[in-house]
Image (cartoon, grey):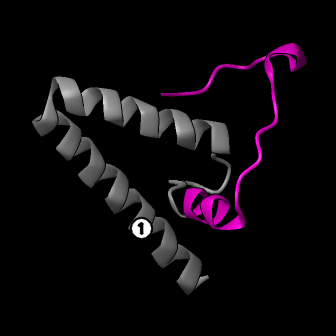
Amino acid sequence: MVGKRTNKESITTIKLEKETKQRLSRLKEHERETYDQVIRKILYILTRIRKDPVSANRLLTRIDRNIKGKNMIKKEG
């Protein structure tokens, strides 16, 4: 799910509540992950849940582990 580079013509702005932005920030697996990448990841998971719930659950478990690991590193640093 690596994001591809886009040109400025394909970029738009959306308004989010601050709480929504904070929630998206907490879903980042790494600091340099963009909000676009986080939203695309969410959409990918939703699609995958419909097709293969077991596989989607494994993916969610891996993502959760990555997020928790990132947060542990932040606390130690």
Q: Residue at x 73, y 20 (%)?
A: 5
Which image quadrant for residue 74?
Answer: bottom right
Residue depicted at x 76% and y 40%? 14
Report the span colored magenta: 1-25
**Taking 11 as reference, is 69 above or below it?**
below
Task: State the residue at coordinates (54%, 27%).
Answer: 2
Would residue 34 be visible to someone looking at this image?
no
Residue type, label 1: Gly
In which quadrant of the rendered view does residue 42 lie?
top left
Q: Is residue 2 left or right of residue 19?
A: left
Q: Is residue 41 shown left or right of residue 47?
A: right
Q: Which residue is mark 1?
A: 69
Vertical order, 58 against 27 (above or below): above
The answer to whether one can see residue 47 in this image is yes
Please state, as top left, top right, bottom left or bottom right, where the C terminus lies in the image. bottom right
Residue 15 picture location, percent across and down: 77, 47
Q: From this viewpoint, which residue is outermost toward the left?
A: 54
Is 73 in the magenta? Answer: no
- Secondary structure found at label 1: helix
Residue at the limit of the structure toward the right, as seen here: 8
In terms of image quadrants, where is residue 11?
top right
Query: Residue sitting at 61 percent across and 26 percent down?
Result: 3
Picture mark count: 1
- Lateral position of residue 42 relative to residue 55, left or right: right
Badge 1: residue crowd in 10 Å (few <14, some 14–19, many ≥20): few
Viewer-nearest residue: 45 or 59: 45
Residue 21 shown in magenta: yes
The location of residue 60, given as percent across then percent down, is 28, 49
